[in-house]
């Protein structure tokens, strides 16, 4: 390996300090380093063979949405609090880098979603996004109740009445989806997970779909001044209104992670969420 990018969360002092330390470590081993303190993320992606992400899950999500499917593996180092995608602890980073430089590491390819929004007022204009974690549509402002109609492959499934809905990947199944009562789906699976948020029903539960399914969400607000907000991976957002249509399907993009060699998926879950055996 000749070139490595280091991307840190610039709002975290510890991440910036670790960037300098990791950069020195790699440069001592004759590896060219490009970091986001002096280069844009786009420039880094165009020059490197691997990226070390220093921060939290948000740092990883930002990288994933910028990579747009390029096969550059990312090692996530947690410099925050919880962190699930970033499963390498700060004290483990050099041990992990040693293994990577010896080409003794495991890649894990993650499923992503494509999101397309068609606005009722501008049907010719569409907005497109990609998501590694999830697509969240929730009520906003004075809205007290949001109704979303769910269609899968053209079939009407149900209408969700409540605070909103989450459409998640397996990677995102341990994020907002989990908090809303949705299932944990293994990170290497390729499924679309739909979970209502605080729904006003005793029977509506999460639905787990295949990667071949096509999801359509139609937005309905009870009053003229009510509206909803859509958030992609906690990074990008836009307002959606009555009559707008959101389509979600499997993306052709994939995101490649370098797994922590010390722990497997379920060991990370136990560590982060306190599962007992």
Image (cartoon, helix red, strand yellow):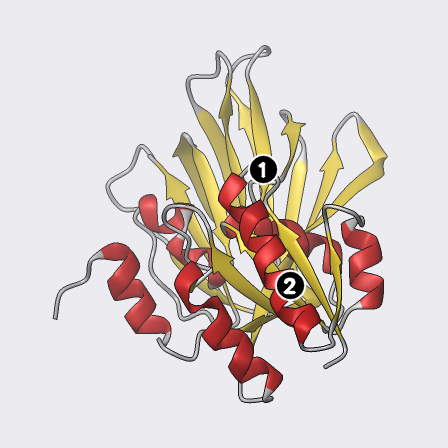
Look at 46% across and 41% down and name the residue there: 165
Q: Which residue is mark 1?
A: 231
Q: Which residue is mark 2?
A: 24
Look at 53% across and 40% down and name the residue there: 13
Q: Is residue 238 left or right of residue 18?
A: right
Q: Secondary structure at mark 1?
A: strand
The residue most toward the left is 277
In which image quadrant can residue 6 be found? bottom right
The N terminus, quarter of image: bottom right
In which image quadrant can residue 217 be found? top right
Viewer-nearest of labels 1 and 2?
Answer: 2
Look at 45% across and 52% down and name the residue there: 194
Residue 51 sits above or below residue 37 on the image:
below
Rendered location of residue 53, percent (x, y): 59, 58
Q: Secondary structure at mark 2?
A: helix
Asked if residue 106 shows in the view, the reply is: no
The C terminus, quarter of image: bottom left
State if disc 2 and disc 1 touch (CB < 8 Å).
Answer: no
The residue most toward the front is 28
Look at 43% across and 63% down and name the residue there: 87
């Amino acid at each position: 390996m000749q070139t490595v990018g280091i991307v840190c969360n610039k709002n975290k002092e510890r991440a910036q300090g670790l960037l300098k330390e990791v950069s020195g470590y790699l440069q001592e081993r004759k590896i060219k380093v490009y970091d986001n303190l002096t280069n844009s993320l786009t420039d880094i992606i165009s020059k490197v063979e691997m990226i070390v992400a220093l921060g939290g899950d948000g740092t990883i999500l930002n990288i994933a949405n910028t990579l747009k499917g390029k096969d550059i593996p990312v090692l996530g180092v947690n410099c925050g609090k919880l962190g699930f995608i970033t499963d390498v602890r700060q004290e483990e980073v050099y041990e992990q880098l040693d293994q990577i430089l010896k080409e003794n590491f495991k890649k894990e390819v993650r499923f992503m979603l494509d999101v397309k929004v068609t606005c009722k007022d501008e049907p010719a204009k569409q907005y497109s996004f990609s998501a590694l974690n999830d697509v969240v549509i929730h009520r906003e402002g004075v809205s007290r109740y949001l109704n979303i109609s769910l269609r899968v492959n053209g079939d009407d499934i149900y209408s969700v009445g409540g605070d909103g809905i989450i459409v998640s990947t397996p990677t995102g199944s341990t994020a907002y989806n989990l908090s809303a009562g949705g299932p944990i789906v293994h990170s290497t699976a390729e499924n679309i997970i739909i979970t209502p948020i605080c729904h006003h029903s005793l029977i509506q539960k999460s639905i787990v779909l295949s990667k071949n399914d096509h999801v359509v969400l139609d937005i309905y607000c009870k009053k003229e001044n009510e509206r909803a907000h859509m958030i992609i991976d906690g990074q990008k957002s836009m307002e959606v209104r009555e009559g707008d249509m959101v389509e979600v399907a499997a993306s052709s993009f994939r995101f490649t992670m370098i797994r922590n060699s010390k722990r497997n998926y379920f060991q990370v879950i136990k560590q982060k969420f306190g599962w007992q055996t």
